[in-house]
Amino acid sequence: MIKRLQTKFSHYKKLTKFHVDIVVSLTAIFGYLVGRGAHSIDYALLLPLFIGGFLVTATAHIINQLIEQHLDAQMKRTAERPLVTGSISKKEALLSALIMSTLGLLLLYFGVHPFAAFISLVSLIMYAFIYTPLKQINRVAIWIGAIPGALPILIGYVGATGSIDRLGILLFLFQVAWQLPHFWAIAWLWNTEYQKAGYDLLPTPGGTNFRNALLTFLSVGLLYPLLFLLWRQGDITLTVFIVLVVLTLLFTLQAYLLLKKRTIDAAYRLMKASVIYLPLVQLLLVYNFSNF
């Protein structure tokens, strides 16, 4: 019995992209902490924010796999997903998505803020029903997908402030900008696999070429004016601004190495750098606002 439960849990971890759900939920927590600033934290709100965000994000990933099941079967990296192998049926996955989304949205509505629940619903719809099918049609999907990918920070921010203001918008735009080199590094890394399934997710046609490496490199540059605005408008201290710029320069260096080498290894290093870069930025911003 215990072994079967462990196996089922393992299947659901793959179906929902468990580790990604955790990261997204933590991003919402980060948004809340920045929104609260130096004010006291409502710890009773953090649990529904985290669990509600987790459930809605998990739902988006389930629907994504339901839609892309036939394409996942064509790629080695996704061929072992539970819907492809039959470990979880379509009916069970659909029912799970319905239950998770309902519970998640209710938790956000009653436990966090109605506006936070609305933003979460918009994020779910955009990711599952716009970004996912658009990936099969046009590479602009990456730009569209960056929006629901960045909305969790606003969900947490609204949980703290009850509204969206200038700072909330800047945080959202920063998250959008970060996702471009992150996504394109992944697209470069798995380009051959994506091509097998008919995906073309790099910025322009031609695959892993100089032009796409250049656009990926330039996309990192979008982070600098947003950091400048945060400092110039008095949201972050000069010290925090300088540290953030140094971190962004190190991130940019990895994008430059991709431009210079255009190898799988360089793409992997850029992807890894993006995963390290974002939480460091978030922790610095939380430190900054908690001391304001």
Image (cartoon, rainbow, N blue to C red):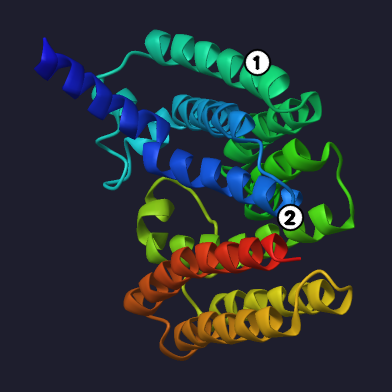
Q: Amino acid at mark 2?
A: Gly
Mark 2 — residue? 37
Residue at 12 percent across and 15 percent down: it is 2
Judging depth in this view, the residue of 74 and 252 nearest the camera is 252
Res. 278 image quadrant: bottom right
Point out the residue furthest to the bottom here.
Answer: 260
Q: Is residue 9 above or below residue 73?
A: above
In terms of secondary structure, where does tag 1 sit? helix
Check residue 288 in the rendering and tell me which mark sits there, or answer none. none
Q: Is residue 6 left or right of residue 64?
A: left
Residue 89 relative to residue 21: left or right: left
Q: Considering only order in the chain, which callout, 1 or 2, is on the residue closer to the N terminus? A: 2
Question: Where is 216 relative to 50, above or below?
Answer: below
The disc labelled 1 sits on which kind of residue?
A: Leu
Answer whether residue 188 is visible to the viewer in this image: no
Vertical position of residue 166 compared to residue 222: above or below? above
Observer-nearest of 277 and 85: 277
Mark 1, other Cα within 10 Å: few <14 / some 14–19 / many ≥20 = some
Q: Nearer the viewer, residue 78 or 173?
A: 173
On the question of residue 58 being in view, the answer is: yes
Q: Position of residue 135 (x, y in %)?
A: 58, 44
10 Å crowding of disc 2: few (<14), some (14-19), many (20+): some
* Placement of the C terminus among the 4 image quadrants: bottom right
Q: Mark 1 sits on what residue? A: 106
Residue 114, horizontal then vertical, whole percent: 78, 23
User: Who is closer to the viewer here, 81 or 113?
Assistant: 113
What residue is at 69 percent from the left and 55 percent from the top?
Answer: 143
